Image (tube, rainbow, N blue to C red):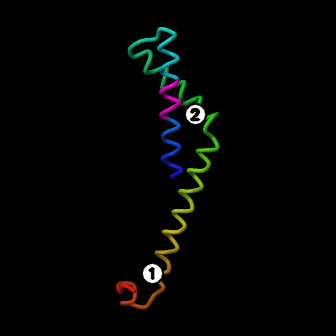
Amino acid sequence: MALLKYTLLRLAVLAVTTGVLYLVNLRGWALLFAAFLASGLISIVLLSRARDEVSTSLVMRRQRIHERMASADDEPDGQADREP
């Protein structure tokens, strides 16, 4: 969920930046280049908390997967394949 939130926020920053630069009369490739560059720089500052949430959720997910794999390896042969 945190990754989806962060992605939507990044897209929103890109859209707003593109709109502002369009109003400044940038067009074509210059508009796209400037919008991606500016939105990336803005996102570094404004979305640091959301980026930290994504990082934390990914680390926690990786730990849960690792723990599940370790516990499956600890079970005797044949036990891991059976359903409860």
Residue 53 versus residue 16 in the image, above or below? below
Q: What residue sits 55% from the left and 66% below the top?
A: 63
Q: Quadrant of residue 49?
A: top right
* Residue for point 45% across, 81% down: 72
Residue of label 2 = 43
Q: Which residues are magenta?
A: 11-16
Dot 2 amino acid type: Ser
Residue at position x 58%, y 45% from top?
Answer: 51
Q: Which residue is mark 1?
A: 72
Callout 2: 10 Å neighbours few (<14), some, many (20+)?
Answer: some
Q: Is residue 59 above or below residue 74?
A: above
Q: Position of residue 62 (x, y in %)?
A: 51, 63
Q: Farthest residue in the top direction?
A: 25
The x and y percentages for residue 64 are 52, 69
Mark 1 or 2, closer to the camera: 2
Q: Does 48 appear above or below 55?
A: above
Magenta stretch, main secondary structure class? helix
Q: Is residue 61 magenta?
A: no
Q: Earlier in the sequence, mark 1 or mark 2?
A: 2
Q: Secondary structure at mark 1?
A: helix
Q: Secondary structure at mark 2?
A: helix
What's the CA distance linking mark 1 and mark 2? Answer: 40 Å
Task: Point out which mark residue 40 bears.
Answer: none
Q: Foreground: 66 or 23?
A: 23
Q: From the image, which quarter does the C terminus lie in?
A: bottom left
Looking at the picture, which amino acid does disc 1 mark? Ala
Residue at (48, 68) in percent of width and height: 65
Q: Are marks 1 and 2 in contact (CB under 8 Å)?
A: no
Question: Label 1: how many residues lie within 10 Å, few (<14), some (14-19) or many (20+)?
Answer: some
